[in-house]
Amino acid sequence: MLITPRLILRPLTIGDTDQQFDVLRDPAVSASIGVFKQPFTRDQAEQWCVAAEQFHATGTGLLCNIFEKQTGQSVGYVGTAVSDPSLAKDGIWEVGYWLRKDRWGRGYVPEALDGVTKEATAKFNLKGFFAELAKSNTNSARVVEKSGFSLRDEFLKATPDNPQRPSYRYFRCTI
C-alpha cells in the first residue's frame, strides 16, 4: 500500500472489480482509454483486475486502486507495467490511469502518478516511464505534462474501437 498526501494506493485485486466498473462505466472516463471496447462492461473490469494480479505475481507491474483518504472511496486507478518489451528491456514501463469524472481537476492523477512511479522505480530499478494517449484527449495531455512527461512521438494506434486512432507517446526519465 502506498500513501500520498490525499490518497491511498492499494494494488488491485479481483475484489476491486465492482469499484473499477463503477468508475469505468462512465463513457467520459472509459472511451478515451483505448484499451477497452465500448460500452464498458463488468466483465472487462474483472478481466482488468485479474490481469493486474498477474502483473503483480510476475513482478512486471504495479497497478493500484486509488482511494481518497478523506472519504475512503475508490475513485480510480493508477499503475505502471511492462507493455512494450523493447522498452522494458531498457527499464521503461508504461503508466496508465483513470479517475471518476467528479474528481477531475483536483490534481489526484499527478499525485497518484508520483506515488506509483516512485515506488516502481525503487522496487523494479526503472529508468523511465511512458504514457500513450489519444491525440484528442487534451485533458490527459495536460495531466502527463504536469507530471513531468514530454511529448516524444505521434502515431496511429490500433484500439478495440478504432484501428487507427491518432495517438501521442510521452516519456519521463527517472535518472
Image (cartoon, grey):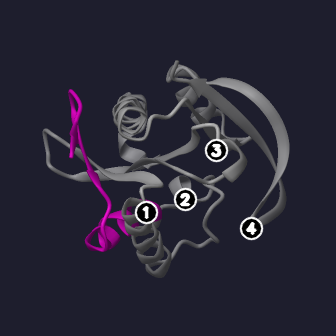
Question: Which SS class for mark 1?
Answer: helix
State how far apart marks 1 and 2 are (Cα): 26 Å
Q: Which amino acid type is marked by label 4?
A: Asp
Q: Is residue 5 magenta-colored?
A: yes
- Of circles 3 and 4, the one toward us is 3
Q: Amino acid at mark 3?
A: Lys
Residue position marked by numbered label 3 in the rendering? 89
Residue 84 percent coordinates (x, y): 67, 51
- Residue 116 inside the magenta-drawn segment: no
* Mark found first going from the N terminus, 2 or 4: 2
- Alpha-carbon neighbours of circle 4 within 10 Å: few (<14), some, or many (≥20)? some
Query: Would you call the spot at circle 2 few (<14 residues within 10 Å), some (14-19), or many (20 or more)?
Result: many
Q: How many marks?
A: 4
Residue at the spot 42% in from the left edge and 38% down from the top edge = 104
CA distance for labels 1 and 3: 15 Å
- Amino acid at circle 1: Thr
Which residue is labeled 4 in the image?
161
Identify which residue is drawn at 67% across, 31% down. 170
Residue to which mark 1 is pinned: 58
Which marked residue is nearer to the observer: mark 1 or mark 2? 1
Mark found first going from the N terminus, 1 or 3: 1
Crowd rating for badge 1 (residues with CA inside 10 Å; few <14, some 14–19, many 20+): few
Could you tell me how far apart the alpha carbons at marks 3 and 4 are, in whole angstroms? 29 Å
- Separation of residues labelled 3 and 2 (CA atoms): 29 Å
Disc 1 and disc 4 in contact, CB within 8 angstroms: no
Left or right of 110, for residue 165: right
The residue that label 2 is drawn on is 30
Question: Mark 4 falls on what kind of element?
Answer: loop
Q: Residue at x 42, y 68 (%)?
A: 54
